[in-house]
Structures are given as C-alpha cells and as structure tokens.
Image: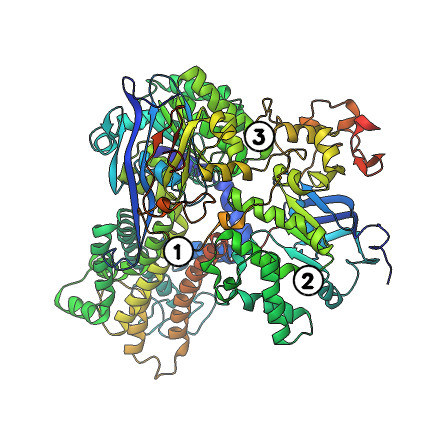
Amino acid sequence: MSDQIMSQSLLDLKNISKVFKIGGGLGLISRRTIKAVDSVSFTIPSDKATITALVGESGSGKTTIARIILGFVEPTSGEVLYKNRRISDWLKKNRMGYLREVQPIFQDPYSVYNPFYKIERELEKIIKRFKLASSKAEKRELMLNALKDIGLRPGDLIGRYPHQLSGGERQRFMLARILLMKPRFIVADEPISMVDVSLRTTFLDYLASFKDKLDISCLYITHDLNVASYIADRIFVLCHGRVVEGGPTDAVIEDPLHPYTKLLVSSIAIPDPKRRWKEKTDLTSVESFEKLKAGEECIFSARCPYVKEICKQKAPPFLETKSGRRVACFLYF
Amino acid sequence: MACESESGMSVLEVQNLKVYFESVWGNYKVVDGVSFKTHKNEVFSIAGESGCGKSTLVDGILRLIKPPGHIHSGKVIFEGTNLLEIPEDEFRRIRWVKIAYVPQGAMNSLNPVLRVEEQITDAILDHSNMSKEESRELAISMLEKVSLPVEVARMYPHELSGGMKQRVIIATAIALNPILVIADEPTTALDVVVQKSILQLLGSLKENYGMTTIMISHDMAAHAQIADRIAIMYAGKVVEIGSIYDVFEQPLHPYTKGLISAIPSIGKKYVKSISGLAPGPLNWPKGCRFHPRCPSAMDICSEVEPTMKDVSSERHIACHLYE
Amino acid sequence: MSELLGSLKQRSSVFISLFKRSPALLVGVALFSLLLFLAIFEPIIDQYRLEGHKATELGYFVKFLPPSLKHPLGTDQFGRDVLGLHLIGLKFSLIIGVFAGGIATLISVCIAIIAGYRGGITDTILNGITNSILVIPSLPVLMVVAYYTRLNLIGMCLTLAAFSWPWSTRIIRSQVLTLKQRSYIELARVSGLNDFEIMFTEILPNLIPYIIIGFATSVTGAIFAETGLRILGIGPARVLSLGLLIQQALQYGLLTQKRYLEVTSLTLFLIIIFVSLNLINKGMDEVFNPKLKKVTGQ
C-alpha cells in the first residue's frame, strides 16, 4: 500500500522542519539549537479512514509534529496542508472550520480538564462554539448520547468535577467529546500511557470503531510498538526527528528494513515468557555520546551496526523500494 | 547466624504485612495482608496496576513509611530476623549493604552537583569502612559491571541520558554486593531500547552476582521477559503467585486472566479489557475485592474474603473458584 | 457567567472543608467578618448605645469620663464616646482599605492575566509599566497629590490604588505563566475559545486563591498607607479613619498627657485588622500551596 496521492490527501506534510532555540536574551542570543523535526514528509490519505501510527522514542520529534498539525507550533520550514490548504491559512482565515475537522486527544487525563468546572462543560463548550445543537433539549440529548455510546453512565459523570473521576473515566470522556464532535481527523498523543493497563484496549477499540463506523482518521503517536501493531494500519518510524521507515504496520514489524526499526522491533518486550529476548542489546546501538551535525549525515550512523562511509557524509533520502516499502537507508539504495 | 539463604529457603519472607494510612476521611488500608517468599538467586516480580499498593508494600518492607502511614501488623523476615522489629540504626546497616533499593524515578534524584563517581563513592563510604581510594576503585569497577564507558565516571548527571542514569543508580545499588535488590518501576520513562538493556541488566544480577532481585512494575511485558516467579497484586492483597510460565500460560485468578488478556502485543489477535474500575483503599468491596468486576463471581465471593491457598508447590491462589 | 455563579452556589460545602484544613483561615475570616459587621452596622450600633446620638456629636457626654460599662473606652476631650469613634474609624478605614484594595486588585489581575497570557511584546510593555510604578516613591508623590488637590474619599482610594497595584501583579502573573502551560488551556484553544475567553473563563477562576491573597495584601497596604499619611497630616478631614483619629489624638497631646489608652486602643484596632487579613493570607497559603499542605495520606 503506497502513499500515492490519489485525488487529494487529507493531511500532507511537506518537508517539515522545526528548530528550537535554547538560550537567553529574548531568543536573540541563542546558545544552542535543537532540530526537533528534520525534513519530515508523509501523507494521510483521504479516500478511506486510516489509523496511522507515528512511532519513535523520546526526542524523536513525534510530539512536535503533533503540535504542528494542531497549530500550536509553527514549522521553521516546509508546509503542512490539510485538504490541500495550508494550515497557517486555515488558522488565520477559517480557524473554526479547521478545528471542526481536526481535534486532539491528549496524553494526560489529569491535567486536561479545568479543575474549576464540572466536566460536562467541555461538551457544552464545543456544542456552543461549533453550533452542534439548536436548543437546550437537543444539547442535552447530544451529550447524553455521546456519553452512553462510549459506555459511560451519564449519571456517574454529569455534575462531577474532574478530580472526582478516575484517570480511565477522564480519558474515556475525551472519547465522548470526540464522538460528540465527530471531527474528520484526530491527533492522539500517547492517549493510553496514563490509563490503567486493564482498560487500555477498550480505549483503542473505540478509536478503531471511530475509524470503521464514523470515517474518522487518526494519527496515533506512541513509543509502544505493541500498541501500534494492535491499532494502526500504517506506521511511520521516527528517529531523531527524521522519518526512517514507513509502510503497512504488519509488514514493518514483521520485516523491518531500517536498522533502527530492526533495533526497535527486537527490543519490544513481549508479554509472553515463552517469547523472550534472544540476544542482549548491543550497547553501542542503544545510545552514544557522539554529537550529530544536523543534516549532514544519517542520524542513525553513530549507532548503526551496518554503517558505511556514505552514511556519515550524506543523509539518505526517503524512497520507495521495489516491493513498495519506504525507507531512508543506504542499504537499499 | 541462621543460614536461611543457604538451604534454599526464603531470602525474604513477608508475612501478612498491613500498611494503613489514617486520615480524617477514614482508614486507607493500602496494603492489607500481603504474604510471599523470595528465593535465593531468582527474579521475583510483583505486578499490579496503579493503586494496588505495590509501591507502598516496598516502602513498608524497607521501613520507609512516613506518618500518617504506619505499619499496622505483619512480619518481614530477612536472614532470620524480623526487620520490622529491630532498632532503626541496626536496620540502617542492613539497608543498602544487604538490601539494595532502586526507587521509582531514582534516576531523577541523582545529585546534580556531584560527578557520577562521587555519587557512588559517597554511598559506598556511608555504608562501609573502605578508604577513599578503595571506594573509588570499586565505583569504577561497578560502572564497568553495568556496561557504562569509564568516561561516565567524571561526568555530571545532566550529561547522561535516562538510561545511563538508571545504570548509575543500579551500579550504586549493587556496589556493596547486597543479597537482595528491590527495584520499583525501574523502566518507566525509559525508551523501549533502553528498557530492554536495563531489564536485561536486572535479570543478569542473579547469574553474575548471586543476587535476588524483586522487581515491582505495572508492565506485564517486563515481568514476562525476566522474571522467574511472579505475584499479582490487586486492591492491597496478593491474589496469585506462581512461576512466570505457569501464571502466563495458565492464569488461575480471574483478575490475572483479565490482566493478561488486556495487554496488546504483536501477533496477538484477541485482546479484551477488564470491565469496571479498580476500587479505592478507603472502602474495599466486601468479600473478594475483585468480585464486582469478576466474570466468574459466585454468591460467596461478595460475602467471604478468599484466603491464599496452595494449588501445588509454589503455586498459590486466593480465589473461591479453587477451594 | 451564570454557570460560574451556579457552580459557586454548590461550592458551599467546599468552603467548609477549606476551613477544616486551616484554622488560620477560619480565624482570619471570622475576625474580618466581625470587623466588617461592626463597620457596616456602626450607625445602628452607635444609635443604640448612645441614646440616638451620633458618635461624632460634640459635647453630648461629659468630657474625659473614665472607662465604664456605658463608655467602655471612656469619653474624649469633646465629650464624645471613644468606642463609638473607634467604630466610625474602623468603618472608614475599612472602606478605604476595601475600595482602594479592590481597585488595585482589579487592575493588577487584568494586567497580570493579559501580560502573562499574551506574552511577547505585550508582556514586556506591561512588565515595564508595572516595574516603573514600583520604583516610584509613593509617599512623596502621595503627599504632593494630597497637597495640591482636594482629596475626598474616592480620590484617596484611587490614589492609594494607583500605587499599590503592582505588588500583587507579579505574583499573579507568575501563576498565570504556570497555568498557561496546562493541557486544559490547549484543550480550550482547540475547542474554539478565543484569547479573551480563555483568559477570563479558564485562567481567572484558577487564580482565585491568589486574587484573594492579593486582595488581602492590597487592603492591608492601603490601610497602612492611609494611616501613615494621616499621621503626617495628609488626607480628607471628613473621612474619620482610624489614622485620622490617631493623628487627632497625637495633635491634642494625649500622649504627653499620659492618656495612653486611647492611642493604644486605636492602634489595637488597626492591628486586629492587619492580623485578620494576614491570617487569611496564611490560611489561603496553607490550603492552596501544595508544599505546605499537611499530609492526609492520599
């Protein structure tokens, strides 16, 4: 399954880079720059709803990409198109139109609700702002239905303050909010990492049902390949701000091409004592002290067991192999 | 000195430990009667979700409970003595020298103004009679043992990654060759690749140094990878104990079954959450604490609390289905 | 707005639990409420006590009566009941304190929220203004203003407010900076709220503890400043605040006459006002500052 742009892609990232300056003096005297995102390009197709996983470790830039898509951060270079129109354009001229279609699910259910108000206010807010109901009765019905459809008992939640609810309930409430709004596209950043283990799959199943029944596509950001394999149709692997591999989830996980993906897959802890790790990790591939010069070489070259000379001189381009898989590695081109 | 650890008997035996917190709202029975034994040279896992009391359990064993929490009753037998009864300074000699502790988030508590080798030598000098030179040598050798390059010794914590910091913590913990190492959530906040290396390090302590390791974590996959035996905790109590293979292959307690089925994993097709919500320590459900969520609940389950019984040697379960 | 008030009504049980957590808060609020009560009902109290005569009426009672049941603090050189005068003084001092403090708090909250939330140039400019006012020596300026204009009660309040608003601004602003990072602000943004709505419906309610502390501090500051000015002889003559009473007492030479009671009692009233406000501050800090919270075992 390739990412050819058919009629129009839903979301199109074109060479997105984001550089953060760290230092004092009003940002004029910056001591260090961090390239959080480096020439990232991928698309989310619009013909069919999909769940795309963006997988990477901390520092890989995945959260920054999410924030760029949601409009919280502006990219230093490159452009992001939603339905063929720049996001910056959307936000300036039709912000409500954009927000109507693109919504987030945040990671931390403990800080995502204003503690001063009752939790249903979050639903009331969007009903009002996006004019989802024309009467009080309709509003009430919308809210009750959304809660019921997520498997929550309205009586248990309405009238309560966020601190009176558990983390699982709060995160489910986020889903109710999405259900009420029915956006076109969700950006979910590690939504289950702070939810109890025994409740995680319920959450994921709802995301899957949003895709199947409501045509809502999702960009699912996570570091956990187990979860990505459960929920995502396609997967993009990020390493130090660059996309190194992309393709259908099963293919990438069963047959990883990029050395970094291979490392990730071999490091997954499988919850089955019969499937234990066979080898010990080669520690040079875990982390190294070498400082990388931004942009000049392959970002994985310092840790790669297959590193060649060319890897230290040029950054490999993200290209498609003959079998339709996409990878940025000189092993294949 | 009683030779408990020699004859294959338990290195650490916890008997009916109860840790309660008193407050104006009532009594929080966070740990409410936990018993288990750990053997020599094994990795013993304590698994459970947030709120089950596992971290408080460790604090109780190590006498780190602060008021308004207190140890209500129970025994912690280590090398023949009940650790809860010996005087504080005697316990302090045991803590760190014989029982090492890697607390949750320890990597964030490294002293930012001390170099790595100073952190380790400080700990060594505090708990032994070595000279400065000896302690320094020991520190360097420990860094090697946890596979850290020797240049790390002169570095400051902020120059290290999370994984490296965790290794430094482990190096400090095993420096004095303890009999028992207790690690609380050693891999949270660490990336997948680093997690594997830390878990493998912990798992190797038994072969390389003859240490017993107790690992506490909510991550069942972590336990599956390195544990020998596992105890499952729910609502302040242990519900099942057994070898890691037995428990994963044939979970007996409905909660264990539910927990294992609820974890997504590569290649696993059938995943299902447990319905309902975990109860809180202020009012545990009457009878079996899992009964409100249990698909196999019987009448007796809402009335009588099940006690821990042996199903076979080394396999213990607290559930009315098996009585 | 209506939802805010609605939810406030249902929070009465919250107040009770607040008081449970901090005896200081309870005592402070109780004391201040008592003072407010006395100030508000002063005319009625004095009517009742003084046989229908106003406390300021000259010459009704015998001069310099010693303290007795009818006149707990005696009478002064003009035959006025001293306790009655105290109550009037309390009333005006509190009026000045509350109004000046209130206006100052209003200004400081608005500036702090806008500066903290908008950041950038707005923040820099507002910060500059705040810091500039802090630097201006308020006492000489107040003296000059008072000298050249005929200050009345309102004027006094406004002038005092103009100099005291920067103090709370910094504290509130830093709290705004912290709150700005919270996820619920981001959620509000993607829910379509504009900046103004976020500032005043999302951030403001979470600043209430700080606003109360700022208010209590401003009130204290205003009364303090006013009293100081009075002792120097500055201020509207018709506004019979505690400070003015002290000044009159000193001017009449009560201290040299060894009539300490009257001056001490006036100062005592002032001290009670300050203590009650400070207890409120301490209590708020105890309840809302997580580091000071007593462990409840959760």
Asked if badges 1 and 3 are on one and the same chain, I answer: no
Q: Mark 2 sits on what residue?
A: B96
Q: Position of residue C282 (x, y in %)?
A: 46, 60
What's the amino acid at mark 2?
Trp
Residue B150 seen in the figure = yes
Mark 2 or 1, closer to the camera = 2
Asked if badges 2 and 3 are on one and the same chain, I answer: yes
Front residue (pair A199, A121): A199
Q: Position of residue C156 (x, y in %)?
A: 22, 61
Q: Mark 3 sits on what residue?
A: B265
Q: Which residue is found at the position 53% from the left and 22% from the top? A: A151
Kindly identify which numbered label has been placed on residue C213: 1
Q: Residues within 10 Å of mark 2 (few under 14, many from 20)?
A: many
Q: What chain letter is assigned to the residue under label 1?
A: C
Query: Judging from the image, what secondary structure is the residue with disc 2 in?
Result: loop
- Contact check, label 1 and label 3, Cβ < 8 Å: no
Front residue (pair A281, A3): A281
What's the amino acid at mark 3?
Ser
Q: Residues within 10 Å of mark 1 (few under 14, many from 20)?
A: many
Residue C94 seen in the figure = no
Locate residue A329 relative to residue A286 in the image: left or right. left
Mark 1 to mark 3: distance in Å?
A: 52 Å
Q: Position of residue A79 (x, y in %)?
A: 25, 34
Quadrant housing the N terminus of chain A: top left
Mark 2 to mark 3: distance in Å?
A: 37 Å
Q: Position of residue C218 (x, y in %)?
A: 33, 59
Q: Earlier in the sequence, mark 2 or mark 3?
A: 2
Mark 1 or 3, closer to the camera = 3
- Contact check, label 2 and label 3, Cβ < 8 Å: no
What's the amino acid at mark 1?
Ile
Quadrant housing the C terminus of chain A: top left
